[in-house]
């Protein structure tokens, strides 16, 4: 017959074990050092030190945690950003064969999807503030920069589009890291357009479309000519990176994201941006 251990005896055994471990810790401090070195307390400990494929989403969450932590402390060094990635293997920059061919999704393709997945049109900025159950504010994010001069749209998106934008920004930073390129944030130049925004745009530019995908909170534009350099104040100035090189890497990310069926992308020549609608 199995003997049942009484509550009092169990507590005494636990206390004795804790006391023994405490004595061992005092007598042999190296035990604690070996444990902490073998299993770091941060959330990146479970990620192995391996080479990462370009624009891999496998290590996206690690970048997220590291960026937020470094941002809060005022530092954004490459070592702190992605401490578990193997930088001994540098990945080449390939770009895409043709921007027009790889990103051909014109208005006729994107508009029906935006209409189906988006919200009802927003009249003005005051109304957007009142519709926070439908729209998410995307003006502050560690993975991308909202263009400070953006005055004909407001930083709100439907949740699905907000997640896509952050996903693209995270993969762009991951790709820069594994290619050994100094960190830059992509710049978002257009987001949700209210009916007032569309009206003022059409007064300035008669060719501006009244049936814009931006009216539904599903669409955003990312500049391919301008980027925000991440420069911690305590470090030396980052080396200059040609915008063409950053454009090549961003196009690789967008090609992969589009191929995964997450979005439609149009390469806009005159506007200097990628026009993206979530699927």
Image: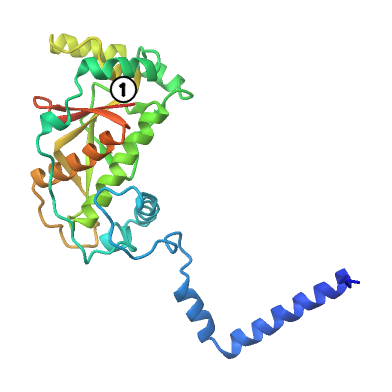
Near-viewer residue (197 or 276): 276
Q: Is residue 88 left or right of residue 59?
A: left
Near-viewer residue (125 or 142): 142
Within 10 Å of disc 1 (Cα), the crowding (few <14, some 14-19, many 20+) is many
Q: Residue furthest front?
A: 1
Q: Position of residue 236 (x, y in %)?
A: 17, 62
Residue occupying image coordinates x 31% and y 32%: 261
Q: Residue furthest right?
A: 1
The residue beneath circle 1 is 192
Residue occupying image coordinates x 42% and y 29%: 159
When the figure is inspected, residue 195 is found, relative to residue 61, above or below; the finding is: above
Location of the C terminus (image quadrant):
top left
Q: Name the element at disc 1.
A: loop
When the figure is inspected, residue 72 is found, relative to residue 29, above or below; the finding is: above
Would residue 272 be seen by someone viewing this image from the given angle? no
To which quarter of the image does residue 26 belong?
A: bottom right
Q: Position of residue 63 (x, y in %)?
A: 34, 53
Residue occupying image coordinates x 9% and y 34%: 98
């Amino acid at each position: 017959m199995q003997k049942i251990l009484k509550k009092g005896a169990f507590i005494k055994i636990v206390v004795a074990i804790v006391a023994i471990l405490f004595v061992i810790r005092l007598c042999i401090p190296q035990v604690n050092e070996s444990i902490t070195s073998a299993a770091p307390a941060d959330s990146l400990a479970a990620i192995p030190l391996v080479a990462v494929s370009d624009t891999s989403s496998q290590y996206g969450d690690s970048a997220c945690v590291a960026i937020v932590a470094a941002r809060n402390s005022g530092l954004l060094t490459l070592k702190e950003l992605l401490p578990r990635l193997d930088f001994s293997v540098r990945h080449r920059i390939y770009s895409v064969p043709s921007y027009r061919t790889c990103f051909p999704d014109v208005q006729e393709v994107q508009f029906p999807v935006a209409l189906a997945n988006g919200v009802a049109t927003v009249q003005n900025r005051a109304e957007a503030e009142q519709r926070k159950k439908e729209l998410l504010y995307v003006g502050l994010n560690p993975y991308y920069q909202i263009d400070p001069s953006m005055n004909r749209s407001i930083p709100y998106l439907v949740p699905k589009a907000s997640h896509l934008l952050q996903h693209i920004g995270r993969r762009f930073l991951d790709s820069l890291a594994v290619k050994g390129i100094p960190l830059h944030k992509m710049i978002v130049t257009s987001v949700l357009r209210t009916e007032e925004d569309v009206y003022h745009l059409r007064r300035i530019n008669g060719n501006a479309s009244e049936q814009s995908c931006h009216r539904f909170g599903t669409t955003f534009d990312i500049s391919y000519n301008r980027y925000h350099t991440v420069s911690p104040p305590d470090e030396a100035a980052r080396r200059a990176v040609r915008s063409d090189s950053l454009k090549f890497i961003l196009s690789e990310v967008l090609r992969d994201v589009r191929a995964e069926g997450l979005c439609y992308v149009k390469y806009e020549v005159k506007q200097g941006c990628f026009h993206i609608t979530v699927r």
